[in-house]
Image: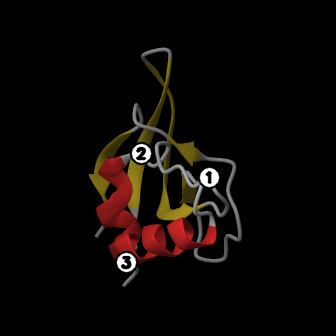
Amino acid sequence: MRNYKSYINQKQIEYPNKFDDSDLAKQFIPFYENQQRIEVDFYYKGKVTETKRGRIGITTGWKPCFLLMLTVRSIGSMYTLGKDDKIVKIIK
């Protein structure tokens, strides 16, 4: 199980005067920690543009954001998650 608070603390130490977690959409934190698969609706200008399934990952650096990792073999993802994106289903 991943620990979100430990990750944040580590990054605040790594980037003491620069770290900014404002792009981390809070609704995805539990799924980042437990790595449960979810289905997400991606929104753009108030409309659903796509629906995808995967696990939550996170970018590195001083201003991270959550990613939807489509497979367990994924190293990165083009699907960044923001505050407007919605979890529509938890995959058992």
Question: Quick one: SS at disc 2?
Answer: strand
What amino acid is labelled 2 in the image? Answer: Val
Badge 3: few (under 14), some or many (20 or more) residues near its Cα, within 10 Å?
few
Question: Can you give x and y, in whole percent of width and height, for residue 76 in the image?
Answer: 70, 63
Cα distance, mark 3 to mark 2?
Answer: 22 Å
Q: Earlier in the sequence, mark 1 or mark 3?
A: 3
Residue drawn 55% across and 68% down? 11
Q: Is residue 46 above or below residue 39?
A: above
| Left or right: 12 in relation to 26 | right
The reply to whether the C-beta atoms of the residues labelled 1 and 3 are less than 8 Å apart is no
Residue drawn 33% across and 75% down? 34
Q: Earlier in the sequence, mark 3 or mark 2?
A: 3
Question: Can you give x and y, in whole percent of width and height, for residue 77 in the image?
Answer: 67, 56
Q: Earlier in the sequence, mark 2 or mark 1?
A: 1
The reply to whether the C-beta atoms of the residues labelled 3 and 2 are less than 8 Å apart is no
Question: Quick one: SS at disc 1?
Answer: loop
Direction top: furthest residue: 45
The reply to whether the C-beta atoms of the residues labelled 2 and 1 are less than 8 Å apart is no
Residue drawn 33% across and 49% down? 26
Q: Is residue 40 above or below residue 28?
A: above
Viewer can see residue 36: no
Residue holding disc 3? 3
Near-viewer residue (28 or 86):
28
Residue holding disc 1? 18
Question: Can you give x and y, in whole percent of width and height, for residue 64 in the image?
Answer: 58, 54
